């Protein structure tokens, strides 16, 4: 474990042995921060809770694959993010095809820095919850999680150029809401 919390190692070992008390301790420790991850991808708290439950089921099922090469929190975040994306794909059957357009992508992408620095996190989250779902997912994956357009396209099974255009539309939507 790269985290210095000796109690965490005991909890993880308990989870490896399917100890329900250890699983509960792990859930209690990480659920609040992981709910925030799920909430960014969900339309409602209820949907975020579904994502959270699916994510923790995956955490418990695959905890043996944690090798300690990164912080345990990082590993849980990664599993939870994958669960949120899987949930999104299964519920929404992501088929958002975007036509090619003549946008200066590089100039537009640099604008994301202005958005991030001009608002507090709470306001960004409020606006992201209002954002239309396909735009919100792409915006989250790019601006919040730091995925490349190629990674987003691979995760969602679509074209990289479509992800660029969708991200630009999400940013334009965000800027319009700010004005």
Image (cartoon, rainbow, N blue to C red):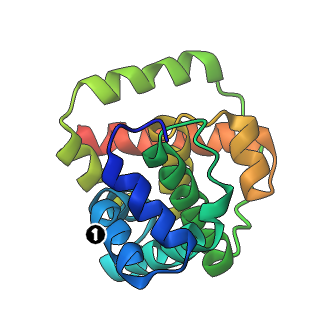
Q: Is residue 78 visible?
A: yes
Residue visible at 62% across and 73% down in the picture: 61
How many numbered discs?
A: 1
Horizontally, residue 176 falls left or right of residue 123, namely right
Q: Is residue 58 above or below residue 9?
A: below
Local SS, label 1 = helix
User: Residue 65 at what x, y percent from top left?
Assistant: 68, 56
Relative depth, front residue between 127 and 57:
57
Residue 156, by quadrant, is bottom right
Residue 4 placement: quadrant:
top left
Percent from the top left, x then y, of residue 135?
52, 53
Does residue 128 appear in this view?
A: no
Instruction: Give the image location of residue 32, x and y in percent.
Output: 27, 63
Q: Nearer the viewer, residue 126 or 169?
A: 126
Q: Choose between 159 and 169: the one closer to the eye.
A: 159
Q: For this view, does 154 lie left or right of residue 45?
A: right
How far across and how far down the image is residue 67, in percent?
64, 46
Assess disc 1: are there few (<14), some (14-19) or many (≥20) residues with their C-alpha within 10 Å of its C-alpha: few
Please give the name of the residue rendered at 61% of the width and 80% of the height, measured from the top-left corner.
91
Q: Residue at x 41, y 45 (%)?
A: 173
Q: Which residue is mark 1?
A: 28
Residue 96 against residue 3 in the figure, above or below: below
Quadrant where the image shows the C terminus: top left
Q: Residue at x 80, y 53 (%)?
A: 158
152 with respect to 54 (left or right): right
């Amino acid at each position: 474990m790269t985290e210095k919390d000796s109690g965490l190692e005991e909890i993880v070992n308990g989870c490896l042995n399917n100890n329900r008390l250890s699983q509960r301790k792990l859930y209690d420790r990480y659920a609040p921060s992981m709910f925030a991850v799920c909430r960014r991808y969900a339309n409602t708290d209820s949907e975020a809770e579904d994502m959270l439950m699916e994510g923790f089921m995956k955490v418990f099922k695959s905890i043996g694959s944690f090798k300690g090469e990164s912080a345990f929190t990082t590993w849980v975040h990664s599993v939870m993010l994958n669960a949120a994306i899987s949930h999104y794909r299964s519920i929404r059957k992501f088929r958002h095809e975007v036509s090619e357009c003549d946008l200066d992508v590089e100039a537009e992408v640099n604008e994301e820095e202005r958005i991030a620095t001009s608002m507090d996190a709470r306001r960004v989250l409020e606006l992201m919850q209002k954002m239309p779902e396909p735009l919100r997912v792409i915006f989250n994956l790019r601006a919040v999680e730091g995925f490349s357009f190629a990674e987003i396209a691979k995760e969602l099974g679509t074209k990289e150029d479509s992800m660029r255009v969708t991200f630009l539309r999400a940013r334009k939507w965000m800027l319009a809401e700010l004005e």
